[in-house]
Image (cartoon, helix red, strand yellow):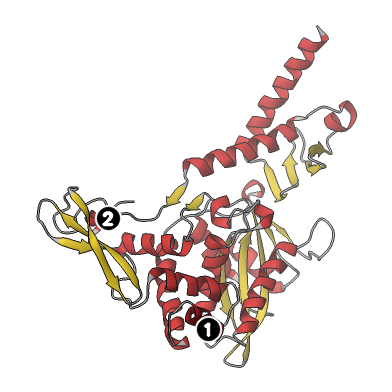
Amino acid sequence: MVNVDLSKKDSVRQEKGRKTALKSDLIRLSDFHYHVHSQTTKRDYDVIKTNGKWSCSCPDHRFRHVCCKHIHSVEYSIQLREEVREQKKVVLSPVTVSDCRFCHSQNIKKHAIRHNKTGDIQRFVCGDCHKTFSINLGFEKMKSSPETITNALQLYFSGESLRSIQQFLKLQGVTVNPSTIYRWITKYTKIMKEHLDKITPQVGDAWRADEVYTKIRGEMKYVFSLMDSETRFWIAQEVLDRKEGADASSLFRKGKEVTQTKPKVIITDGLHSYSEAYRKKFWTVDRRDRTLHIRNVHLQGDMNNNQMERLNGEFRDREKVVRGIKKVDSVIIDGYQIYHNYVRPHMALDGKTPAQACGIDVQGNNKWLTLIQNAKFSSSDERGGYAR
């Protein structure tokens, strides 16, 4: 009889936890720390994960040692977020040939190989219109092969200089100037950014903001960045002239536009610019709808900003190689943001990229190639000639 009563009480706790999660009466501070609002009082309880187990500061858990409704609400919220990401999942697959680019007939077959100086390209013939054609989507009229160009992108954003990339390609039998490599990087970064800006990442509830200084044409500038705490997705960035007195509200506005939502928590340091931006973009009279602003974070302890410091370190390592940025809208900033989000796997995400954690799956061994093909495919007027 006692077991039945305990089972009924646990069912009641689970149902109350589910309702709390659906009402969004909880705030995610980190992977292992949540604030859950009490349904009967004005208090907030801390739900913390240690050694793989959740614990809560509420009396029900502390004195009865049971899985309380607040823990159930956190578990249900995590499950709900995963289900939403799966429902809204975006898959970017390598583009393959399925029909004729002229008459759109699916009666096509391979027809010899075209041998170029930089590689071989497969040709196709249509069984209906009898026309032959080749597909080199995204790399039309390029003298170098897609593999050469994407190798250059990978080397550049993983930290190599243009001269080092030139020497590497020379060992592969490809002779190219550093200026040509930079033009590749500029061209394809722009193409990918225009396409990826149209995709909405499914980010978490807690965002982090921080800034890092850099030199642009010899002048001190600051790169302000906004990142999702749960998925490490680099949401937005902006270059501003100064740190103190800078208008960071445009950074928060960009974040809302990219994600089509706003966070429940924004974590920053004590910079006054963030406080002003928070009041402009996130503060509301309604307490339930108000974003919580956590300031004065430090490097150690529970309330730290180590994730943003890690991102700043990544950018600093890349920026040091080129010895300063030449212009505000440099390809280094936009390109590295793409590399960080869509190409670079993260140990903290179990080898996933931030985009994968946000429900954007870039498939294929060569992610640069997949991104370029999909970007070109989405803007092509000949969509009937290609299939995913």
Which residue extends farthest right? 63
Comparing 281 with 28, the one in front is 28
Name the residue type under label 1.
Gln
Residue at left offset 54%, top offset 86%: 163
Is 294 situated left or right of 381 in this image? right
Does residue 81 appear in the picture of this structure? yes
- Secondary structure at numbered mark 2: loop
Comparing 292 with 114, the one in front is 114
The quarter of the picture where residue 324 lies is bottom right
Residue at left offset 84%, top offset 31%: 61
Image disc number at residue 167: 1
Residue at left offset 82%, top offset 27%: 66
Q: How dense is the environment of label 2, judged by Cα within 10 Å: few (below 14), some, or many (20 and up)?
A: some
**Above/below status of 97 relative to 79:** below
Image spot of residue 74 (x, y percent): 69, 38
- Secondary structure at numbered mark 1: helix
The quarter of the picture where residue 174 lies is bottom left
Provide the residue designation for mark 2: 386
Is 259 situated left or right of 345 in this image? left
Image spot of residue 3 (x, y percent): 80, 12
**Above/below status of 172 relative to 30:** below
Which residue extends farthest top? 1
Q: Which tag, 1 or 2, sits closer to the chain's start?
A: 1
